[in-house]
């Protein structure tokens, strides 16, 4: 699905030097590269506060803790997302209130927001799934009207840009009250292990998130909040400094692959190519098609036998996972999410895809349908 080795080889000199510098300094925890990376990402995203942490799941947890939500509070979250988005809500004793997604961009369907609202609702998590922003204009408006906080799960959409009706545009993760991202190796901005960050333009939230990520510590051995230990290590930060400079270029490479898929796969009747929202750019963390008429699993197997990987993100919506059965949801509650789980198929897309490899993938998809 990705080719991290080729990407490394292309950037080898710079990466090796960055890593070697850390190794020789011995500053493996909180070395200067951690702050440098946070500052550079903050500049890139035009975001006041970037707090690096250990992974995208921690980032979500820290963001929820920063929001000051209390056990029993309700947080609206899409049923069609990676489990981490929901997991942290449950872990903090909050109640995940699932909402269906829309069938075009697979993101939270704002038409259902009103009926999810109760006196206990405190927040909405917008997940920018596969690399395209959710309808942040409407989500923010609704949240503002009802005094809710908006958390953006930007694990899959770093670098995506959203344009509001007033013409202003900003990057995913900086559109709501607090955003989170992941630097998991296969992510658009990925490190050589685990990594994540919390993003916010709200200064007090930024200060609190930074504190929570570091044992709730305001000064050395002074703990003002119950916190966690969640750090991005210096080696990862040094690598991410190198990769951040490439992010625009990475995104362009992914887009080129996506357009080539579009051109050829749109000719196949049983395939729906990814929809593009007018007000969001797409950074194609995934290129996810929908396969009609129950052919998805057979196509996947057909490709697998030819050595072509593909993935189902995600085969089961979160409300139907055993771990979340206590919330009382059942099959049929979220028809779009449930139907997507049967149709979606993500194809290989990455920065190192060659035309020959992509041609091989496309030709074999065509062969299956002929
Ligand atoms: C939408 C979404 N949220 C959260 C995460 C969690 O990130 P991490 O694996 O860095 O904890 C992921 C990672 O796959 C993700 O795709």
Image (cartoon, rainbow, N blue to C red):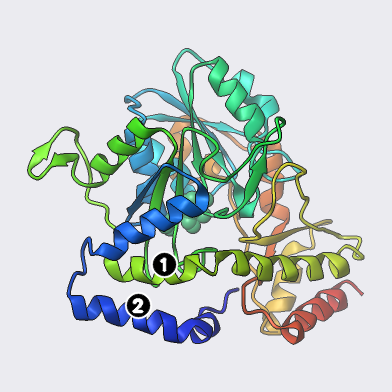
Point 62% across, 69% down: residue: 249
Point 47% across, 12% down: residue: 119
- Real-space Cα distance between discs 1 and 2? 9 Å
Residue 6's image quarter? Answer: bottom right
Q: Please tell me whether mark 2 sits on a helix, a strand or a loop.
A: helix
Answer with left or right where residue 147 lies relative to residue 69.
right
The residue closer to the viewer here, 274 or 138, is 138
Mark number displayed over residue 18: 2
Position of the C terminus by quadrant: bottom right
Tag 1 near tag 2, CB within 8 Å: yes
Q: Position of residue 253 (x, y in %)?
A: 67, 71
Q: Position of residue 170 (x, y in %)?
A: 59, 43
The residue closer to the viewer here, 34 or 57, is 34
Mark number displayed over residue 344: none
Residue 55's image quarter? Answer: bottom left
Q: Residues within 10 Å of mark 2 (few under 14, many from 20)?
A: many
Mark number displayed over residue 241: 1
Residue 200's image quarter? Answer: top left
Point 72% across, 77% down: residue: 303
Q: Earlier in the sequence, mark 1 or mark 2?
A: 2
Q: Position of residue 331 (x, y in %)?
A: 62, 38
Answer with left or right where residue 68 lies relative to residue 178.
left
Q: Please tell me whether mark 1 sits on a helix, a strand or a loop.
A: helix
Answer with left or right where residue 18 lies relative to residue 268.
left
The residue closer to the viewer here, 122 or 298, is 122
Quick check: 246 above or below 66?
A: below
């Amino acid at each position: 699905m990705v080719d991290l080795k080729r990407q490394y080889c292309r950037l080898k000199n710079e990466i090796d030097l960055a890593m070697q510098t850390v190794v020789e300094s011995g500053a493996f925890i909180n070395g200067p590269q951690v702050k440098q990376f946070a500052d550079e990402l903050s500049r890139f995203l035009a975001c006041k506060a970037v707090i690096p942490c250990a992974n995208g799941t921690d980032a979500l947890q820290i963001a929820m803790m920063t929001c000051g939500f209390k056990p029993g509070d309700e947080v609206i979250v899409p049923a069609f997302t990676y489990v981490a988005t929901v997991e942290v809500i449950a872990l903090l004793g909050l109640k995940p209130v699932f909402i269906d997604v829309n069938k075009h961009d697979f993101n939270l369907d704002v038409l259902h927001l009103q009926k999810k609202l109760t006196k206990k609702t405190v927040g909405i998590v917008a997940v920018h799934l596969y690399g395209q922003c959710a309808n942040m204009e409407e989500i923010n408006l609704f949240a503002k009207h009802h005094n809710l906080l908006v958390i953006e799960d930007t694990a899959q959409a770093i670098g995506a840009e959203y344009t509001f009706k007033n013409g202003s545009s900003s990057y995913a993760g900086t559109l709501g009250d607090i955003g989170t991202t992941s630097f998991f190796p296969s992510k658009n901005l990925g490190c050589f292990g685990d990594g994540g960050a919390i993003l916010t333009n709200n200064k007090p939230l930024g200060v609190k998130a930074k504190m929570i990520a570091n044992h709730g510590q305001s000064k050395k051995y002074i703990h003002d909040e119950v916190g966690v230990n969640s750090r991005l290590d210096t080696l990862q930060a040094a690598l991410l400094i190198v990769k951040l400079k490439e992010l625009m270029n990475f995104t362009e490479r992914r887009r080129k692959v996506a357009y080539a898929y579009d051109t050829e796969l749109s000719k196949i009747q049983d395939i729906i190519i990814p929809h593009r929202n007018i007000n969001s750019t797409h950074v194609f963390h995934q290129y996810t098609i929908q396969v009609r008429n129950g052919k998805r699993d057979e196509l996947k197997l057909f490709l697998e036998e030819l050595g072509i990987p593909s993935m189902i993100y995600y085969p089961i919506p979160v409300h139907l996972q055993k771990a979340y059965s206590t919330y009382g949801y059942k099959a049929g509650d979220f028809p779009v999410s449930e139907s997507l789980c049967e149709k979606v198929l993500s194809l290989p897309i990455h920065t190192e895809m060659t035309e020959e490899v992509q041609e091989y993938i496309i030709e074999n998809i065509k062969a299956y349908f002929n």
